[in-house]
Amino acid sequence: MSKGLFVTGTGTDVGKTFIAGLLLKKLHESGFRCAYFKAAMSGNDRAPDGGLIPGDARHVREVSGISQPLETMCPFVYETAVSPHLAARLEGNPLDLETVKNGFDRLAEQYDYIIAEGSGGIVCPLRYDEKKVFLTDVISALKMPCLIVANAGLGTINSVVLTVEYMKARGLAVKGLIFNRFHPGDVMEEDNKIMCEAMTGVPVLACAEENATDLDLDADFLAALCE
């Protein structure tokens, strides 16, 4: 069975996919067999043949250099750019937790490490009809430790602390924080690092500048986080 990390965020558009790609790039370039997984992906474009292109998965594959087939990366792909629970209601094909788990397990038989990514922030409904599935249910089912991606700028103390406390209350293991869109030397953003660590007890493991092509993380350290 493979090991891995689940990348969640303090909200939508904080850069989860961007960071997931850089994490996989680090592992892949260091010789580890690694894969990407996302249970549900909305806001995708259609190919000429009418099929949906999982945009986040394609981005991660291009950035990381992994050769994993796109069709193995995400079991539930939607076109409408809304929360997966609403996209499924509009388009059909609601998320099934067993299907998600089976897709993940197939990857776990083939790869050493899996970087999984969540949809939206940690309080994200993936299905809300006669069955109710939230992002936290997926993390628990996959039994993965987590990294939290946060914007480095104004407001991040509040969003980081609330996200960490919510996850801890549900028994989810948070291994670290990664700040995205970071500006080295910025007084506020440097202080945000200090305050988030102090108020949560969770370390900031790396800071990624805008359009970064690498993370300042040792590959062996990253692999150990996946244990």
Image: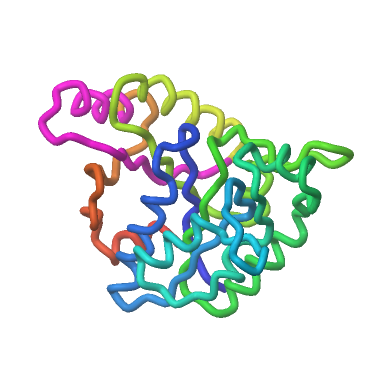
User: Where is residue 110 drawn, in percent x and y?
Assistant: 55, 79
Question: Foreground: 146 or 180?
Answer: 180
> How many numbered dots are placed on residues in this image?
0
* Image quadrant in which the C terminus is located: bottom left
Classify 110 as above or below 81.
below
Classify 62 as above or below 140.
below
* Image quadrant in which the N terminus is located: bottom right
Magenta includes 185? yes
Q: Most extreme residue toward the right, as rendered?
A: 130
User: Where is residue 142 drawn, in percent x and y?
Assistant: 63, 57
Question: Foreground: 88 or 114?
Answer: 88
Magenta includes 184? yes
Question: Foreground: 212 or 112?
Answer: 212
Q: Which residues are magenta?
A: 172-197
- The residue sitting at 55% across, 35% down in the picture is 167
User: Is 13 left, or right, of 84 in this rendering?
Assistant: left
Classify 27 as above or below 84.
below
Question: Foreground: 7 or 112?
Answer: 7
- The residue sitting at 72% across, 37% down in the picture is 86
- The residue sitting at 36% across, 20% down in the picture is 155
Find residue 224 and report its image quarter: bottom left
User: Is 89 left, or right, of 218 in this rendering?
Assistant: right
Find residue 13 and report its image quarter: top left
- The residue sitting at 14% across, 36% down in the picture is 184
User: Is 216 left, or right, of 19 in this rendering?
Assistant: left
User: Where is residue 221 drawn, in percent x and y?
Assistant: 29, 60
- The structure's colour scheme is rainbow
User: Is 1 left, or right, of 31 in this rendering?
Assistant: right
User: Where is residue 38 drawn, in percent x and y?
Assistant: 57, 56
